[in-house]
């Protein structure tokens, strides 16, 4: 039974399954670099967290970063921002983002 569960989880991870759903307005939030927000107002900071592995299977950095960005965009909507900037590096499924209002 354990083998079946592990295989099912491995299949879900390898097929690009995502656990994070966008909020209604998150598509309006842009992921920018620090040099693109110099004329924006910083609304706050958010730290996104997702699973870095499922059971014992490590997850792809690209998939994790994609989920972290979506979580940050969802939070930016709540904070009244329309842009996010990654601050520092992603570590063990966690990433900090600055939230900005540019428009």
Image: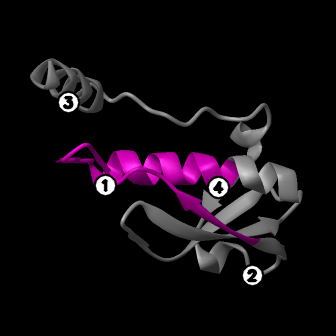
- Rendered-image quadrant of the N terminus: top left
Instruction: Classify 10 Å Cα crowding around label 2: few (below 14), some (14-19), many (20 and above).
Output: few
- In the image, 26: left or right of 62? right
Give the label on residue 61, or none: 1
- Rendered-image quadrant of the C terminus: bottom right
Seen in the picture, residue 55 relative to 90 is either above or below; the reply is above
Circle 4 sits in a helix, a strand or a loop, which is it?
Answer: helix
Q: CA distance from mark 4 to mark 2?
A: 19 Å
Numbered range of the magenta stretch: 45-73
Is tag 4's residue or tag 2's residue first in the polypeptide sequence? 2
Residue positioned 15% across, 25% down in the render:
2
- Indicate which label's residue lies in the foreground, 2 or 1: 1
Q: CA distance from mark 1 to mark 4?
A: 16 Å
Circle 3 sits in a helix, a strand or a loop, which is it?
Answer: helix
Residue 60 belongs to magenta span: yes
Residue positioned 86% across, 59% down in the render:
79
Find disc 3 in the rendering and name its residue. 10
Is tag 1's residue or tag 4's residue first in the polypeptide sequence? 1
Q: Quadrant of residue 12?
A: top left
Q: CA distance from mark 2 to mark 1?
A: 28 Å
Is tag 1's residue or tag 3's residue first in the polypeptide sequence? 3
Residue 29 belongs to magenta span: no
- In the image, 92: left or right of 13? right
Give the label on residue 73, or none: none
Give the label on residue 38, or none: 2
Residue positioned 55% across, 53% down in the render:
69
Give the color scheme: rainbow, by chain, secondary structure or one colour: one colour
Is tag 2's residue or tag 1's residue first in the polypeptide sequence? 2
Q: CA distance from mark 3 to mark 4?
A: 26 Å
Find disc 4 in the rendering and name its residue. 72
Seen in the picture, residue 68 relative to 12 is either above or below; the reply is below
- Indicate which label's residue lies in the foreground, 2 or 3: 3
């Amino acid at each position: 039974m354990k083998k079946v569960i592990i295989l099912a989880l491995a299949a879900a991870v390898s097929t690009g399954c995502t656990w994070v759903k966008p909020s209604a307005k998150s598509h309006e939030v842009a992921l920018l670099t620090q040099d693109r927000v110099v004329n924006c107002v910083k609304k706050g900071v958010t730290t996104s967290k997702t699973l870095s592995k499922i059971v014992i299977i490590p997850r792809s950095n690209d998939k994790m970063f994609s989920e972290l960005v979506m979580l940050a965009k969802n939070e930016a909507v709540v904070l009244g921002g329309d842009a996010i900037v990654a601050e520092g590096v992603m570590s063990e499924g966690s990433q900090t983002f600055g939230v900005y209002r540019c428009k």
